[in-house]
Amino acid sequence: MCGIVGLHLRDPELYPRLGTLLESMLCGVVERGPDSAGVAVYGDTRRVPAGHAAVSVLLPPDADTSVLDALVTRAGDTTVVAAPVAPEDLVARVTAAFPSAVVVGAGRELTVYKGTGHPRDLAATYDLAGASGWQGLAHTRMATESAVVPEGCHPFSVGPDQCLVHNGSFSNHASIRRDLAREGVRFDSDNDSEVGARYVASRLAQGEDLEKALLGLRETFDGFYTLLVTSADGFAVVRDPIACKPAVIAETEAWVAMASEFRALAPLPSIDSARLYEPEPGRVYAWRR
């Protein structure tokens, strides 16, 4: 059992409130996953100034980040590095300086934070309330398939400005992992959710949109799951064909949100007038910026 929340803002006037809204949603699913929490924020210029790329990375505790000649923010287990270069060049710079580093997110608008501990404490560590932006997601974890370490936390961000969070379990992830490995895909953890993220990233890299990529996942992966997947311009939700794991979607003219439980949506502005519904089994719901 894990907790998922996500918020896609349509109204720019709400952008300064993204962090506070996302934190309130995260706190609404704490009991579903008390051992760790991960957050992804799109458009937070504190961490990714205009014209910059950012890399979120798990570094050795004694890493001297001054060698990177970049804007560096430490937030618990995660370090965010930003510089006015292409994302792939910044990833190369970070991994060359710290070969043991694990990159957990990269892009032109994306900041990812991952860590173990109580989600409420981690929200403060990440300074989530101070974030602004146009889209965000968060995950609280109750580990079932892999160790409680930062590398195993969600979200899994394995493509540029892409994230995936998962509640459930993929039963055939080992065979799909082997297939992807034969194609040259590298993995950073033994988490089954990373396999799903790598699969979606490979489909997006081939030119598919989020909806088509998730339809492919639905046909390929067995198990029970609710997934929220985000990209540089998209926000998508899918449940397995039996819909074993809970999910609620809410929509207004100002925003789209989803959560594992309604109580996480309750603090959102104008929730009383929102369209509320449970996503249908096996159907992909997708929105674009």
Image: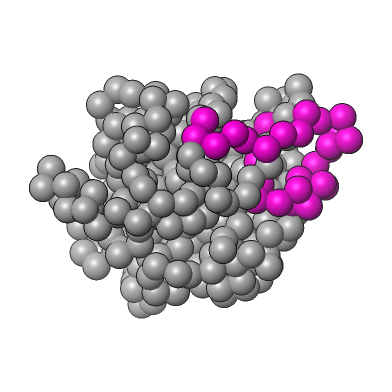
Please identify the quadrant where the N terminus is shown.
bottom right
Query: Residue visible at 82% across and 47% down?
Result: 267
Q: Residue furthest bottom?
A: 62
Q: Which residues are magenta?
A: 256-283
Is 286 included in the stretch rendered in magenta? Answer: no
**Whole-percent x, y for residue 193 in the image:** 39, 54
Q: Judge whether 281 appears above or below 65 on screen.
A: above
- Left or right: where 285 falls relative to 84: right
- Left or right: where 251 falls relative to 173: right
Q: Judge whether 66 appears above or below 83 on screen.
A: below
Colour pattern = one colour
**Whole-percent x, y for residue 219 in the image:** 34, 35
* Res. 215 image quadrant: top left
The one nearer the camera, 241 or 16, is: 241
Query: Residue visible at 36% across and 77% down?
Result: 62
Query: Residue visible at 44% across and 74% down?
Result: 148
